[in-house]
Image: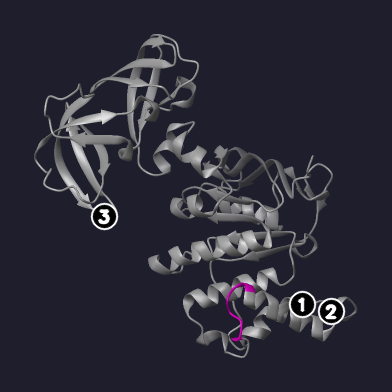
Amino acid sequence: MTTPMLTVEGLRKTFSAGTGRAEDGVHAIDDVSFDVQPGELLTLLGPSGCGKSTTLRAIAGLEHPDSGRISIGDRTVFHADSGTRLGPDERGLSMVFQSYAIWPHMNVFDNVAFPLQVVPRRQRRPRQEIRDRVERVLRTVELGGLGSRPATKLSGGQQQRLALARALVTDPDLLLLDEPLSNLDAKLRESMRLELKRIQRSLGVTSIYVTHDQGEALALSSRIAVMDKGRIMQLGTPREIYEAPTCEFVAQFIGTSNVLPATVGAVEGDLAELSTEVGPISSRSWSDLTVGQDVLVIIRPEDISLRSPDGEGAAHWRGKVVAGAYLGEAIDYVVTVDGRELRCRSGPSESGRIDTEVDLDIDPSRVHVLRSEGASR
C-alpha cells in the first residue's frame, strides 16, 4: 500500500478570545484529519474563517496546533504528545502565498534561483546545476527566455507563475498554495487555473490548495475537503462533492441548490416517494430511508427542465417564472411554485419566459435526499 505523502490526524487549534478563560477560545480547527496521496492535489475549500488557512499554516509549520500529528511521507514533522515540532525549513515543502512576494530588485532568474543560493555553502549546488534547474522550471511555467527581465516588468499572471517557479525549483515533497489566484482578474484567474493544473499534473508534485472559490476547487482538484467552523464537512472528488453532498452546508456552499424539507411517503424498490411543501417528488438518489422520516430534498437548478404547459405528460410541478438572468452560457430563472421560489437553469437559446406559467420536470435520479442526521434544518 502506498504511503501517503501527507497525513494529518486530529489537529486542533484554539485561539485565545482575550478573556483569560480557555473555554472562551475560538476553535480555528477542530479534529481535522485527512491524508494526501503522492501526486494528488487536495483543495481545502470553505468560507472565510472556516479554518482552511490555519490548517495549511499548521502543515507548513507556521502554526503550532494544540493537539494532533502531521507526517510528510514517513517523517513525523509535528506531534503534540511527543513534542516533535520541525521548523518550516525542515519539512521539505514550498509555499506560494496570496501575494506574489517576489523580490522587486531582482530579475526573473535571480528570483527563482534565490532558494537555491541561500542554503549554507556546503549544501549549495554547483552554479551550473542551479542555472539548469532554474531554466528548466522557467520553461515549465512558460517563462523561458525571460530570465533577464526585471520581475516588476512582468504582468500579473507572469508574476504568479514566477512565484510558482520559485516554489518548484527546490523539488519540494509538498507544495502548499494559499489562495494564489485571488489577486488576478476573473479572466486571468480562469486561464491560470488551467495553467496550474497542467503544471501540477506534468510534474506530479503533491499539492495542498486553499481557496474560497468553488470554481477553482472543482476545476483543479483531485479531491476537495469542504470546511466549516474548523471541521471537514465532506471529503471527496469534485464530482462527489457536487453531485452527492452529504449535508445541507455542502449542498448550499457548492454551486446553487434548491433545498426542500420533505417527508418520506413510500419506498418501492429503488424509488422513494416524498411529499414537500410544493408537491410530491420521486427520488432514486437516496439510502436508508424509512416511511414517515423527515428528510431534505436537494435539487440542482440545471436538473430542473422547464416547458410550456401543453398537457403532454404529467409534470412534477407547475409554477410561474418571476425573474431571469442571462449568464451567457445559460439563463438562470426564479420560478414560484405554491409561493416557494425555486432556482432553475436553462440553455442560453431560451427567452421570453418571464411572467409565464411553466411545467417543471425533474428526473428522479437527480433528486438527492439527505437523511435527518445529514440535514441541519
Q: Tell me, yes or no, whether the highlighted magenta stretch contains residue 142.
A: yes
To which quarter of the image does residue 235 belong?
A: top right
Residue under the point 57% across and 89% down: 150
Report whether residue 127 is seen. Answer: yes
To which quarter of the image does residue 151 belong?
A: bottom right
Q: Are marks 2 and 1 in contact (CB under 8 Å)?
A: yes
Query: Quick one: label 3 or label 2, which is nearer the N terminus?
Result: 2
| Mark 2 residue element | loop
Residue 4 in the image: above or below residue 291: below
Location of mark 1 (residue): 116
Task: Tell me if mark 2 has few (under 14), some (14-19) or many (20+) residues whose alpha carbon lies within 10 angstroms of its own.
Answer: some
Task: Tell me if mark 3 has few (under 14), some (14-19) or many (20+) residues whose alpha carbon lies within 10 angstroms of its own.
Answer: few
Which amino acid type corresponds to the residue marked 2 in the rendered image?
A: Arg
Q: Is residue 371 left or right of residue 306?
A: right
Alpha-carbon span between mark 1 and mark 3: 47 Å
| Mark 3 residue element | loop
How many discs appear?
3
Which amino acid type corresponds to the residue marked 1 in the rendered image?
A: Leu
Residue under the point 77% across and 61% down: 92
Q: Which quadrant of the rendered structure holds the C terminus?
A: top left
> Looking at the magenta stretch, what is its main secondary structure?
loop
Location of mark 3 (residue): 327
Looking at this view, is 105 or 310 the one in front? 310
For the magenta stretch, what is the residue range?
A: 140-146
Residue 337 in the image: above or below residue 271: below
Query: Quick one: label 1 or label 3, which is nearer the N terminus?
Result: 1
To which quarter of the image does residue 25 belong?
A: top right
Location of mark 2 (residue): 125
Q: Tell me, yes or no, whether the highlighted magenta stretch contains residue 248.
A: no
